[in-house]
Amino acid sequence: MIARALAVSAAVAVLAATPSFAQTSCSVAGQNGKCSPDVVLANPGTMTNPALLKLTVSPTSSPLSPLSVTAAMADMEVAAGVATPVSVSFSVQGNRAWSVQISGAAATWTASAGAWASKPISDLRWSLSSTGATTAMSLTPASVTSGAATAGSASTTVYLRPAVHWATDLPGTYTIGVVFTLTTP
């Protein structure tokens, strides 16, 4: 009776340990009833993990569209732009090194209500500081910041200031798009 129970147990162990697509066998010897087949997979499990990057920008629409900054007499002909900047913040998530760039969306501002139609993109100034030196915006992307793989970078704030000029900036409304680009080095 014991021999018959072992034979049934061995048969069940062979059926349970052997999937229909594998050519593996297992046998049980003794009273312990342990079966340990060797299984080699021709195609082991694989996973493809692409570069995952996420850029979160806030606000998604800036008060610069339409221009809500009103230039004062003291702002005219100031190379750094108007005294009160508009800020845009962003953060990055990525499983690899990354870099964020900034550029203008067009060579000239869109003009309406009598504004000068040829105001260049360089009249929009940007910086990482709310005071001090600024950089002229360009159609060519400029590096803002970069980092290593992260579950969430610290927020980076970019300050935008339009530059205004006595001779060319006629009264009116000026709008311009700003492009933030997330890249991998």
Image: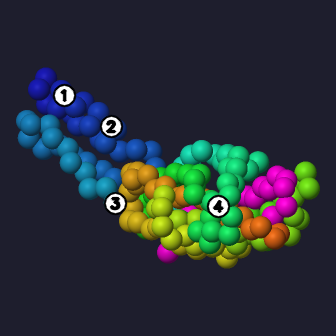
Which comes before the other along the chain, label 2 or label 4? 2
Say if mark 1 contacts mark 3, CB within 8 Å: no
N-term-proximal mark, 4 vs 3: 3
Between the C-alphas of marks 4 and 3, the distance is 75 Å
Colour style of the rendered protein structure: rainbow
Task: Check disc 1 and report the residue beneath it.
Answer: 4
Q: Which mark sits nearer the N-terminus, 2 or 1?
A: 1
Q: Amino acid at mark 2?
A: Ala
Q: Write the start and end of the magenta stretch as one range.
A: 169-185
Q: Is residue 115 magenta?
A: no
What residue sits right under mark 2 in the picture?
Answer: 16
The picture places residue 168, in percent across and down from the top left corner, at: 82, 69
- Tell me which residue sits at (23%, 37%) in the image: 10
Q: Amino acid at mark 4?
A: Asp
**What's the mark number on residue 75?**
4
User: Can you tell which quarter of the image residue 3 is in?
Assistant: top left
Q: Secondary structure at mark 4?
A: helix
Q: Nearer the viewer, mark 2 or mark 3?
A: 3
Q: Which residue is farthest left?
A: 31
Q: Which label belongs to residue 40?
A: 3
